[in-house]
Amino acid sequence: MLQENRLFPIESTARGIARSLYETVRSLPIVSPHGHTDPRWFAENAPFPDPAQLFVVPDHYVFRMLCSQGIPLTALGVPRVDGGPTETDGRKIWRLFAENFHLFRGTPSRLWVEQSFADVFGLTKRFSAETADEFYDHIQDCLARPEFRPRALFERFGIEVIATTESPLDDLKWHEMIRRSGWTGRVVTAYRPDPVVDPEFEGFRSNIERFGELAGTDATTWKGYLEAHRIRRAFFKSYGATSSDHGHATARTEDLPQADAAALFEKALAGRCTPQEADAFRGHMLTEMARMSLEDGLILQIHPGSWRNHSAGVMAMHGRDKGFDIPTRTDYVRALKPLLDAVGMRPELTVILFTLDETSYSRELAPLAGAYPALKLGPAWWFFDSAEGMRRFRELTTETAGFYNTVGFNDDTRAFCSIPARHDVARRVDCAYLATLVATGRLDEDEAFEVAHDLAYKLAKTAYRL
């Protein structure tokens, strides 16, 4: 059973303030400016196949925990890249999930799943092996009804706008189908150019050739390659994109002379880059993307610090983004200096920095964002998308960067039904933090109500130009 005062302070005065703040923001529309929901859901508006396909198969928070206890991803229905056998019986997957739900005790995943069960499907019993079939049958019955189709849930969840994330090689056909359908739900895309800016991405040269075909230019020349980015960015903007998104292993940036950048591009196309040269090319392209953002207005998001697809075996069998992206140490002060020297003082540019290295919050990120006009701090992300992680983020960044060099909250999820729960957790945690500031005399109560609204809604909408 969900506790009404969950995540609020224990001390009664601060708890009362937090509760009052929360009541003013709990029902605000959801602005989801960065995530990985499938636009096909909203384009086709078909029923979700079964509970396992809704809660388990797309959610790497869920299946990575089960995998950590020795349960194969194939047993959880995670597809194989070679089309080989994987479990397709939703009820079997669901029972396995339920039998092992105790593994999620104390985790944010449990909060999200239980709140989704309660708020979306009206299920308030404890989820377990004993209740698995009851939950499965009830959710399956719900999914067959029109009010549980993707568009209806989108509207019920109070989503004002949601951004998906697509490669420049994507034709955006699902976004086109949404547009042609006449449905008024706002689903926009975001430009994620990793396959064509990372020389270590599989099939890099063929990706570049396809990139050029889509852009109608020869992308195998340096000049044509940059022009292809401009053309594809404009195409993405025509489908509502307000941001680009970059998932590099490091925060390294470079601002190379154009002749040097062109020579490095040639080496990348030939497959002759060393790991250091590949990182330098990625770093230079961040600066090129920032300059393009000055031209076309797209927000630049940098998501560094993850050793992506750490397990070679899982990568070979299941492909990218299957729960094996692991945080690493990240240097921002030195790594970002070339980009900041080039464009960091331009207030018309917005660069949103994320981190998986919490040690950098107070030492590097908050001081950088507290000085450079172009920089904003993204919220606690991924492994720190938890009540504790969000609280640490506020404690470690507010004293130097304040609230208004941050950008609110984004859910960054593939698990559609968890979106309201994730935003609710963020709103509760922020209200708890603000209540503590009020109770300890560091913020006036009327100011706290204004900040609570900004953190829940306004900052994300403003920062992402939505």
Image: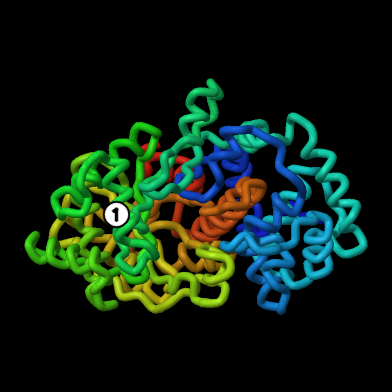
Q: Is residue 403 above or below residue 23?
A: below
Nearest the eye: 407 or 235: 235
- The colour scheme used here is rainbow
| Mark 1, other Cα within 10 Å: few <14 / some 14–19 / many ≥20 | many
Q: Residue at x 12, y 66 (%)?
A: 263
**Picture mark count:** 1
* Relative horizontal placement of residue 379, taking residue 259 as reference (left or right): right
Quadrant of the rendering where the N terminus is positioned: bottom right
SS for dot 1: helix
Q: Residue at x 17, y 67 (%)?
A: 264
* Relative horizontal placement of residue 16, taking residue 426 as reference (left or right): right
Q: Is residue 458 visible?
A: yes
Q: Is residue 461 above or below residue 104?
A: above
Q: Residue at x 46, y 66 (%)?
A: 395
Question: Residue 185 appears at what percent x and percent y?
Answer: 54, 29
Q: Is residue 376 visible?
A: no
Question: Residue 356 appears at what percent x and percent y?
Answer: 44, 70
Nearest the eye: 75 or 442: 75
Nearest the eye: 336 or 178: 178
The answer to which image quadrant residue 30 occupies is top right
Amino acid type of the residue that numbered disc 1 sits on in the rendered structure: Ile
Quadrant of the rendering where the C terminus is positioned: top left
Question: Residue 298 appears at what percent x and percent y?
Answer: 30, 43
* Relative horizontal placement of residue 70, taking residue 420 as reference (left or right): right
Question: Residue 167 appears at what percent x and percent y?
Answer: 40, 50
The answer to which image quadrant residue 15 occupies is bottom right
Q: Residue at x 27, y 46 (%)?
A: 212
Residue position marked by numbered label 1 in the rendering:
208
